[in-house]
Structures are given as C-alpha cells and as structure tokens.
Amino acid sequence: MCPAAPRPLRIAIVVASLRILGGQAVQAQRLLNGWSDDPRVDAWIVPINPIPPAPFDRLLRVKYLRTIVTQLCYWPLLVRELRRADVVHVFSASYSSFLLAPLPAVIISHLLGKPVLLNYHSGEAEDHLRRSGIARRTLRRHVDVNVVPSAYLRDVLERFGIRSTVVSNTVDRRVFAYRVRDLRQRPLMLLSTRNFEPHYNVACTLRAFARVQERFPDVRLTLVGSGSQAEALKATARRLELRGVTFVGAVPPSEIGRCYDAADIYVQTPAIDNMPLSVLEAFASGLPVVSTRVGGVPAVVTDGVDGLLAPDDDPDSIAARIIELIEAPDHAQQLAAAGHDKSAQYDWEQVRESWLAVYQAVAASNRDAGRALEVQRSA
C-alpha cells in the first residue's frame, strides 16, 4: 500500500482585502495565487476589513462607526478562521493600523495556541517602533517569527532588538509584458503608481515633471493611485499649469500591467519606502526607473546599473535624471534590461521555497512546543 500524501500546511493569511488597494493586499493575493496549485500549502485570506451583513454594512460609510463595526465583525472572524490554521501569517503596517489589525490577530492566535508569523512591511517602522511600546513587545515576545521583505527593514528591527528573517516581495512577471522602449520616439509617457499619501510625496513627481516639460513640451505623465492628497495634487498640477497629466485613479491588480505597458519611463519620489512593489513591476515591464534614494530603495535599485536615483524631495535632481534617460536612450535601454534581469530573482518560483521553509519551521516549532507541554503535564 502506498503511503498517504502528507496533509498540506494550512496557512491563514491575515491582511486587508483588495477592497483596500495597497502593496500588502496585492502581495497577499500573489501569495494566494502562487499557492493555489501547490499541494504543500492550503492558504486562504482572512480580511482585516470584513463586510458586515446588511443592514449594518451601511455603517461603513460613517467615519468613526466604520471602525467599531469592522472590529465587531473582525474578532469573531479571527476566532472562526484561525482555529483551523497550522500557521497564522499576519501582514502588518504601522501606527493605529497595527493596533486594529495585527494585534487582534496575534491575541486570538495565542488564545487558540496557533503560531504567528508577523510579516512587517511598513517603511515607517523606525518611527512606529520608537513610539510604540506595544508594537516592540509584540514583535519581541509574542510572535514566533518576524518576516520582512528587505535587508533594510531587517536592520531597522534589529536596532530595536527584534530579530527577523528576510523573504523578498514577489512579482508575477506573467502580468507585466516586457518590451524594449525607444526613448527617441515621441511623445513619451512617464508613469507613477504610488498612492496619494504624504509619505509617497507624489507632489515632488509633479514638480519634477514641470521641469521636464519645460525641456520636452510633449512629454506626458500618468498618475495611478488614490488617497487623501488626491485633490491637493490635482490643484498642484493646475497651479503648475502642467499639460498632459492624467489622474487615472485606483487600478485593480488584474489591470495594472496595461498601465506599465503604455509607459516609457517609471518615476517615483517617496520620502519613506521599504521595498516598493512598483519598482519590481516596472523592472518586469522593461521600464527604466527613476526614484528617490530613500529607505530600502537602494537595495532594489542600483544607481547607474538598473535605474537612476536622486535625493529625497529634490525635484530638480529627479527631473535631471529623467532628462538624462531621454537624452541617452541607449543607456536607458541598458538600465531597463538590467532591471528586467533583476526582476527574475523576485519571481514567485524563486520566492516560493523561502516562504515554504519559514512556514515549515514555524509549524514544526509549534508542534515541538506542544509535545514538550504534553510531557510536562504527564510528568
């Protein structure tokens, strides 16, 4: 008789659903898609933003009631979904969202005796951990393993005495059609896909674009994203009298590849960043990349090798780097080709085994701890 196949590891992924379009939700969906055809892992998403049943779903439109109603649905959902997991994989950001989403998942996991993998993604980690004793204690004492997507973030956590393991973000290169750009052709299209929040500093992108457009009047800019600064950014574009700026709004992951395919140069100007998925997507699409040199970006983009970097909040320098690409199209192609080659190391086939190894180690550690407890009780 053939031995039965081992049961797959059951992984509950606690993260925002794609109703909140952001890097964590996109990354979690890519994990879910990747595991869907792998018999070793049975993964599912536990949304931190569940939709309450009617008629209470109407309360989500009310600012403060939204949080209360969501929490009243979220905690019971955690109890129901985490009890069947072997490992609880919790995506985490910073500040109040840490208290409302990851912390409840950690608490319920411990009550259920489930091991926790906390996947910390925030580029604001240093400030958050300095301010929050709750977050520091949670990551140090109440999480079985902390996983971060970059060496940069690992070093930040280490400064607070928090150990972590690096597993890179992954990009589904099948979604992004690679093609070689010829920057001699006109008109050229610049692309930014960062959400309209202060730490992404999209206003700097607009100011840099104004300087580029003075030199190349037919250059265009597409901004993909949404957020609290949307109206302010539109006002900035009007004040600068920019031409050819298109605010597309939020674009679902299934369609984002078209935005990259239509562009010629990718530009982003965040003030704080960790390991931007947008850069990996640009690499996979064959776009030359210009970015600010902040946070973990230099660990992804090597200046002059696979992209160009500039100082933080310096529109003159960003514009100069964009113009450098336009005036040296052969060099731009070389940078884009190197970026595309680099994107292969972030493909799911490369990242899959790293995740599996972490899941297996956490699950095994929990089983060993359970056996030790049984021995103590029987002694």
Image (cartoon, helix red, strand yellow):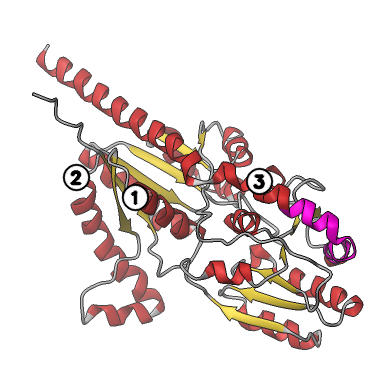
Q: Is residue 326 magenta?
A: yes
Which of pointers 3 and 1 indicates the residue nearer the eye? 3
Give the residues in magenta. 317-336
Kindly report the distance in space between the C-alpha atoms of the residues bearing marks 3 and 1: 30 Å
Lower sequence index among marks 1 and 2? 1
The secondary structure making up most of the magenta span is: helix
Q: Quadrant of residue 151?
A: top right
Residue type pointed to by label 3: Asp
Q: Is residue 24 above or below residue 141?
A: below
x 47%, y 70%: residue:
252
Query: In front: 185, or 156?
Result: 185
x and y percentages locating residue 104 in the rendered image: 33, 51
Residue type pointed to by label 2: Arg
Q: Is residue 224 above or below residue 245?
A: above
User: Outermost residue toward the top?
Assistant: 379
As drawn, the label of residue 84 is 2
Residue type pointed to by label 1: Ile
| SS assignment at label 3 | helix
Query: In front: 119, or 308?
Result: 308
| SS assignment at label 1 | strand
x and y percentages locating residue 329 in the rendered image: 84, 61
Residue under numbered circle 3: 341
Lower sequence index among marks 3 and 1? 1
Q: Quadrant of residue 212?
A: bottom right
Residue under numbered circle 1: 13
| SS assignment at label 2 | loop
x 30%, y 36%: residue:
115
